[in-house]
Amino acid sequence: MEEAEFNAVADAALAELEEALAASDLFDYEVKPGGVLELVFDDGSRIVVNRHGAAREIWVAARSGGFHFAPREGRWIDTRSGEELFTALSRLAGEQAGEAVALRRRG
């Protein structure tokens, strides 16, 4: 995948994630320059989601560890577990929030 194509699909995924975060009132989030989203929890912990152009991946840093997601057939899939990005973020956010979180994709 060329860099321009990666940037387009990563930007679309991050925009979709931002929409899902805006629909949730369980935690705050911040949009940072360079394609970075930070989920901020009541206890001060954070989950950071950013694109990594050189690796052509979206990276997630959470309390429980780091995760790399690669584009596969229109979805972002964890390169180790095979878990989809929104599913993984729902699980990770739930772990940090201490309650169930369901981030929904469009459509």
Image (cartoon, rainbow, N blue to C red):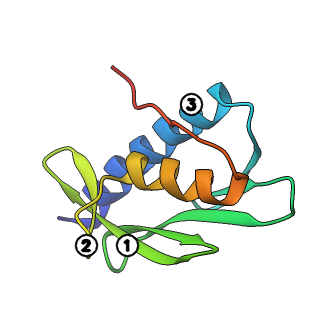
Q: Earlier in the sequence, mark 1 or mark 3?
A: 3
Amino acid carrying label 2: it is Thr
Q: Earlier in the sequence, mark 1 or mark 2?
A: 1
Query: In terms of image quadrants, where is residue 36?
Result: bottom right
Q: Is residue 89 above or below residue 24?
A: below
The label on residue 68 is 1
Cα gap from disc 1 to disc 3, whole angstroms: 21 Å
**Dot 2 alpha-carbon crowd within 10 angstroms: few under 14, some 14 to 19, many 20 or more:** some
Cα gap from disc 3 to disc 2, whole angstroms: 24 Å
Q: Nearer the viewer, residue 89 or 70?
A: 89
The residue lying at 24 percent from left, 47 percent from top is 75
| Residue 15 placement (x, y as % from top left) | 51, 39
The residue lying at 49 percent from left, 78 percent from top is 66
Q: Which residue is mark 3?
A: 19
Q: Earlier in the sequence, mark 3 or mark 2?
A: 3
Labelled pair 1, 2 in contact (Cβ < 8 Å) = yes
The residue lying at 20 percent from left, 44 percent from top is 74
